[in-house]
């Protein structure tokens, strides 16, 4: 947990700089693929995912150490070749997990957030799930466990394998010659993120594309079929926490409402998108039928709101960075503090993205979030030890939380007035 947090302290600024560089590069080249609110939503989604993982909000049902201890038939040495084997095993497992997520109703909920952006850029790579509370991924690492690949090797290779999937989420790199036959390239992954009928459920590979070619799921990017991005049942929100549970909530509602008792239990394991006939007829859900003619989700904004959204986003990133860099000291203060801090981060993301959605209840969420922050300052007389780095940290943060409530309230009132004028 602490080691992963310190790795993220390096990775997060690097990813942010690359996201901003892509924005600048697209603007410079006259092909801007990054919308401001969409980018902030993606960054916020990344924050929730890494926060959940670092503070350990999940249950491991089938762990790799368990398989290694009980099933290994031999042991391989901790050498370079072992790391290569582990990398290949992770990628093979990743292909099948990815494929399962796309073709099964229940597992799609854990992946929908990654496809929820209607843009395709480096920022959308950061849209990762928080709904996968139960981890069963290790079942796909059985080959590595059978050959006795050490746990430390898998733990070292896993973050590298994950981070290596970032770079190809871009529209600014065209086809890459012979590499198209070996690795997943931006062209391959553009196909994967597209909702064109020709492209849906193709190219599941994470690092190597030959898995798709071997298992019949490969599709090249066609020059006559430009990819259209998103999901066919658009999420219509910037709030990544809502996005993470939208599909699961629909399944729960469908299971409750259907009169078919068989469907109540089996709809979870049906192909992605399946709904009982009686429920689909009575409770229709909007679905994009013509992918070339639909309106992307957007909300009315202004230079002031864009600026404030970035201020809040940067503050969230600073709060998260402080958490990741001080896990041990925070745990030393109180074992429960890390979970309270995680809750504060989630509230921060929720409040900001509700404001971006122009939801009038954003002020309620902001009051809860800033109120919790002020409560921490009052109880501790500090911000989880921050006064040891900056003696005035308590006063600065107190002023910030107070100001944040006031500004959010002002935007909510402003949005309400503008919306009432439009309605009138």
Image (tube, helix red, strand yellow):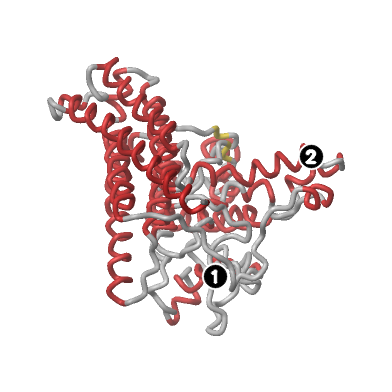
Along the horizontal axis of the image, is 206 left or right of 234?
left
Q: Residue furthest left?
A: 391
Q: Position of residue 402 (x, y in %)?
A: 27, 29
Asked if the residues shown at circle 2 and circle 1 are in contact, with their CB atoms under 8 angstroms apart, the answer is no
Left or right of 256 in this view: 320 = left
Dividing the picture into quarters, in which one does residue 246 lie?
top right
- The numbered mark at residue 257 is 2
Splitting the image into 4 quarters, where does residue 265 fall?
top right
How many numbered tags mark residues here? Answer: 2
When the figure is inspected, residue 185 is found, relative to residue 405, above or below; the finding is below
| Residue found at x 54% / y 73% | 227
Q: Secondary structure at mark 1?
A: loop
Q: Position of residue 214 (x, y in %)?
A: 62, 70
Q: Nearer the viewer, residue 29 or 422?
A: 422
Residue at image position (27%, 17%) is 378
Q: Which residue is mark 1?
A: 228
Q: Which badge, 2 or 1, comes first in the chain's sequence?
A: 1
Report, in whole angstroms, how far the alpha carbon at label 2 lies from the one at label 1.
33 Å
Name which residue lies at 38% across and 52% down.
40
Residue 332: x %, y % from top left = 30, 20
State the quadrant of the N terminus. top left
Q: Depth-wise, is mark 2 or mark 1 nearer the camera?
A: 2
């Amino acid at each position: 947990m602490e080691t992963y947090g310190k790795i993220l302290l390096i990775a997060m600024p690097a990813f942010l700089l690359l996201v901003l560089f892509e924005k600048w590069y697209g603007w410079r080249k006259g092909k801007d693929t990054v919308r401001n609110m969409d980018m902030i939503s993606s960054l916020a989604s990344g924050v929730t995912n890494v926060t959940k993982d670092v503070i350990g909000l999940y249950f491991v049902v089938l762990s790799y150490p368990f398989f290694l201890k009980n099933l290994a038939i031999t042991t391989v040495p901790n050498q370079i070749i072992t790391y290569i084997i582990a990398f290949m095993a992770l990628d093979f497992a990743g292909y099948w997990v990815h494929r399962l997520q796309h073709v099964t109703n229940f597992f799609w909920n854990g992946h929908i957030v990654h496809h929820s952006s209607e843009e395709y850029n480096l920022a959308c790579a950061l849209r990762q799930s928080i709904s996968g509370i139960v981890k069963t991924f290790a079942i796909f690492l059985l080959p590595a466990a059978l050959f006795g690949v050490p746990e430390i090797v898998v733990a070292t290779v896993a973050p590298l394998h994950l981070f290596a999937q970032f770079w190809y989420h871009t529209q600014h790199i065209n086809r890459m010659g012979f590499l198209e036959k070996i690795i997943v390239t931006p062209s391959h992954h553009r196909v994967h993120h597209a909702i064109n009928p020709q492209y849906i459920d193709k190219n599941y590979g994470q690092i190597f594309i030959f898995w798709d070619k071997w298992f019949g799921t490969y599709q090249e990017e066609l020059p006559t079929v430009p990819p259209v991005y998103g999901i066919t049942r658009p999420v219509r929100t910037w709030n990544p926490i809502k996005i993470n549970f939208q599909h699961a909530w629909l399944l729960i509602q469908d299971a409750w409402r259907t009169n078919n008792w068989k469907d109540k239990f089996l709809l979870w394991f049906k192909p992605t998108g399946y709904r009982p006939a009686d429920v689909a007829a009575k409770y229709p859900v909007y679905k994009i039928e013509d992918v070339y003619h639909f309106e992307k989700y957007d909300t009315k904004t202004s230079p002031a709101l864009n600026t404030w959204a970035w201020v809040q986003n940067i503050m969230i990133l600073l709060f998260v960075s402080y958490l990741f860099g001080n896990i041990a000291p925070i745990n030393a203060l109180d074992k429960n503090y890390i979970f309270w801090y995680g809750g504060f981060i989630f509230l921060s993301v929720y409040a900001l993205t509700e404001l971006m959605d122009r939801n009038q209840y954003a002020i309620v969420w902001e009051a809860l979030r800033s109120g919790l922050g002020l409560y921490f300052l009052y109880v501790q007389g500090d911000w989880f030890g921050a006064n040891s780095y900056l003696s005035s940290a308590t006063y600065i943060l107190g002023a910030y939380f107070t100001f944040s409530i006031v500004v959010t309230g002002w935007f909510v009132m402003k949005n309400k007035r503008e919306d009432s004028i439009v309605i009138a």
